[in-house]
Amino acid sequence: MFDVALKSAGAQVVLATSSDGNHPPENIIDGDQETFWASTGLYPQEFIITFSSMMSIQRIEIACYNVRKISFQTSKETEPTNFEDLLEKELDSTDNALQQEEFPVNNKRATHLRVTIENGYDHFVSVHRLSINGNAVHG
């Protein structure tokens, strides 16, 4: 297994509902927890990551600030369409500490992952890292 959501593994952020020039969505998948994507207020906020090929996902890890409710959907299509619900979680407030969450996923196949931040503890949220442990599906 390896992190299939890294830019260096061929993953791309193909959509983000907000973008700040100083904190672009690509920071989510650069592998550096010091960089981040910042929302510009209002909810929901979402971003879509497209993998280099069909992946089998085992675990999703996220490091973020001020996220209250988050959901994940997957798509197996060539284009990022026809998403299916994967999981939805309510995160605890961490009083300005980094929220680090891990979600086990049982070998879910996907070419795209949509992450929706439904609500936050503040007007702004930030996502510092999204790590997805998985493998490419062959054949």
Image (spheres, grey):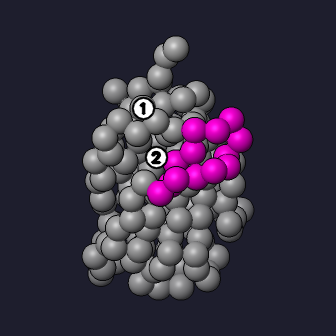
| Residue 80 locus on image (x, y percent) | 67, 46
Specify which label sits upstream in the sequence, 2 or 1: 2
| Residue kind at label 1, given as amino acid type | Ser
| Residue 35 locus on image (x, y percent) | 51, 55
Residue 57 lies left or right of residue 6; in this view the side is left
Which residues fall within the magenta stretch?
73-85
* Residue 74 highlighted magenta (yes or no): yes
| Residue kind at label 2, given as amino acid type | Asp
* Residue ID at (41%, 26%): 135
Secondary structure, magenta segment, majority class: loop
User: Does residue 119 appear in the picture of this structure?
Assistant: yes
* Mark toward the viewer: 2 or 1: 1
> What residue does disc 1 label?
56
Residue 137 lies left or right of residue 102; in this view the side is right
> What residue does disc 2 label?
32
- Label 1 near label 2: C-beta < 8 Å? no
**What secondary structure is found at the residue carrying circle 1?**
strand
| Residue 70 locus on image (x, y percent) | 43, 68
- Rendered image quadrant of residue 94: bottom left
Q: Residues within 10 Å of mark 2 (few under 14, many from 20)?
A: few
Farthest residue to the top: give it.
139
> Which residue is at the front of the view, 76 or 41?
76
* Residue 17 highlighted magenta (yes or no): no
| Residue 85 locus on image (x, y percent) | 47, 57
* Residue ID at (50%, 75%): 118
User: Does residue 34 appear in the picture of this structure?
Assistant: no
Q: How far is the residue under mark 2 from the one under mark 1?
A: 23 Å
> In which quadrant of the rendered image does the N terminus lie?
top left
